[in-house]
Amino acid sequence: MTQPPRTSAASSAGKTIAPEDRTRLDQVFMQVMLDTQAQVQQSRPVQAGNLAAMFHKEQVSEALQGCAMLIAGWNQNRIDEAGTLRALRALRALELPELAGRIEKLADIDEG
């Protein structure tokens, strides 16, 4: 019995972007990524204390990892779903809803 070919999760996760759309929208996408990364890195814990600082540091790392996944996916002509979800969870935990909204809108970047 033959098994179907294996596909990696990375190659099938997310929305495909046409190469011409990616070229046209590259500057917009990268600006959102750069702004998000900069604002996340400049954010401060909402509460004082070691536990809050540790939680904040972890969420900053998660947000930056999500952005890295989004950029890697973008370079493969797709919006990475796992990266989007990772970044959204972290941005919401960091209480940065405006940034989360911008990341959420990236899924429809080619439709506007």
Image (cartoon, grey):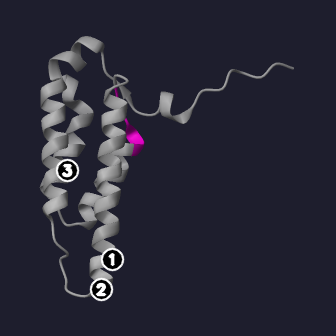
Q: Amino acid at mark 2?
A: Asn
Q: Which mark is residue 33?
A: none
Q: Residue furthest right?
A: 1
Crowding around mark 1 (Cα neighbors within 10 Å: few <14, some 14 to 19, many 20+) is few
- For the point 17% across and 49% down, which residue is it? 36
Q: Amino acid at mark 3?
A: Gln
Residue position marked by numbered label 3 in the rendering: 37
Q: Amino acid at mark 1?
A: Met
Q: Is the residue under label 1 in contact with that under label 2 (CB below 8 Å)?
A: yes
Q: Is the residue under label 3 in contact with that under label 2 (CB below 8 Å)?
A: no
Q: CA distance from mark 3 to mark 1?
A: 19 Å
Residue 58 image-quadrant placement: bottom left
In the rendered image, which quarter contains the C terminus?
Answer: top left
- For the point 23% across and 66% down, which residue is it? 94
Asked whether residue 10 is drawn in magenta, I would say no
Q: Which mark is residue 54?
A: 1
Q: Evaluate whether residue 52 shows in this view.
A: yes
Residue 38 at x, y percent in the picture: 14, 52
Q: Evaluate whether residue 79 shows in this view.
A: no
Q: Magenta residues? A: 78-82
